[in-house]
Amino acid sequence: MAESKKYISQEDLSRHNKPGDLWISILGKIYNVSDWANYHPGGELPLLNLAGQDVTDAFVAYHPGSAWQHLDQFFTGSYLEGYSVSEVSKDYRKLVNEFTKMGLFENRGLGVHFSLFLVAMLFSLSVYGVLYSDSTWVHLGSGGLMGFLWIQSGWHGHDSGHYQIIRSKRLNRFVQILTGNCLAGISIAWWKRNHNAHHIACNSLEFDPDLQHMPFFAVSSKLFNSLTSYFYDRKMNFDAFTRTLVSFQHWTFYPVMCLARLNLFAQSFLLLSSKRLRVNNRVQEILGLLVFWIWYPLLVSCLPNWGERVMFVVTSFSVTGIQHVQFCLNHFSSSVYVGTPIGNDWCENQTNGSLDIECPSWMDWFHGGLQFQIEHHLFPRLPRGNLRKVAPLVKELCKMHKLPYKSVSFLKANELTIGTLRTAALQARDLASPVPKNLVWEAVHTYG
């Protein structure tokens, strides 16, 4: 006689959502991933943020077919009571299967090799201009080339964090460390931790680190309530100093983006020096950063005077600021929410929180795949060279299920972002709900 299945309710499942007690549902089967969280290649945050829920669509989005065979070791023997699949999830999973059969997740094309060659050329030209020219204009151009180098290396770091850009795992890891840590000074471990949390909790003000930029920026007045960041594990205080900065954020946005790289440097060091957080290959990551902090200051020191050295650094930072702007355009003006990300609303969350940028195919190199942000968020394992191919199918999926599919020009995306920041800035200036004052606030608002 067949043994009857054991079922647990969604309410019971939701109680298993804490470190050391993490349960999830995939296709209605309950898995205990409490111990696995410490070894999960994507880090513990995706599991923590979606624990106590059905996470089938997120699992399908992030894992290849070979990952399914490893699930049985975590199966509790129980099933989710009343498990059902929405129509949009059914069609989404069909698309994943179709793309898999078409080989789109494996077909990386020749773009990777070309872009790696481009990185090598940009680095060589920048170094050559500094070492073998006495012209200030050439040195200025070399700083610009360094900025473009960091942009292109950023695309490699982004892509390799989602999938293997090169078939060999060891070579893929080497490229990660080379283009991220060694050439750009950004820890790939920090990037993966930050970016995976962003994807899972797209545009959640409490869980998405890409929207947690106070005291400099607040994309929504909801942040004025001093919400808690579950990524940084701290309260995001909206005090008088923060209000002052946010009040002018639509004016300071582009200047801050020119220096945003400093924050990435700091975040990389904070993660790698943390004793509380687990970091895979920590020594390897630290050595990669040391390489950067040896060659870059040494190259800058080769310039003839302090004026040109400052010019070179500011130029390289400002040019790569374009990429920081691009990251913001895709999400700042989209819908935001407060609360935990919902696992079975995968398609709704990703489309509501993302914005596509219209551009011709010959400009794809400039945007690095971010112009197809909706497609990328729905199918994060898809190589960027295939995003344009699937865009019509994604658009049809959104139309069929009445999901938002927002696509605007690069200029319009900038207008929308500045408009969002301006709206929040004007709300921050409203003194109807006063916040605790400090000396900076008093100094700025003292008259006579």
Image (tube, grey):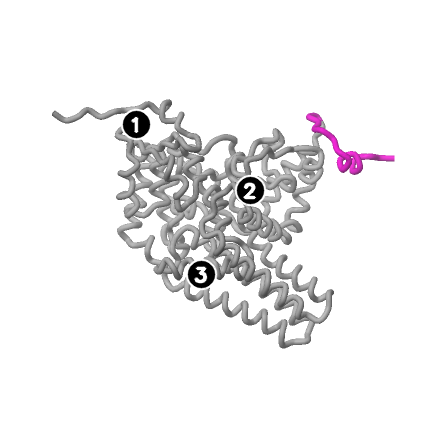
In this view, 134 is above or below 88: below
| 115 lies left or right of 9 | right
Q: Which mark is residue 175?
A: 3
> How crowded is the residue under tag 2: few (<14 C-alpha within 10 Å), some, or many (20+)?
many
> How crowded is the residue under tag 1: few (<14 C-alpha within 10 Å), some, or many (20+)?
many
Q: Position of residue 43 (x, y in %)?
A: 43, 43
Amino acid type shown at disc 2: Phe
The first of marks 1 and 3 along the sequence is 1
Work out which residue is located at the far right of the displayed protein and give it.
Answer: 448
The magenta segment = 432-448
Residue carrying label 1:
80
Pair 3/2: label in front: 3
Amino acid type shown at disc 1: Leu
Amino acid type shown at disc 3: Val
Q: Position of residue 341 (x, y in %)?
A: 45, 34
Q: Secondary structure at mark 2?
A: loop
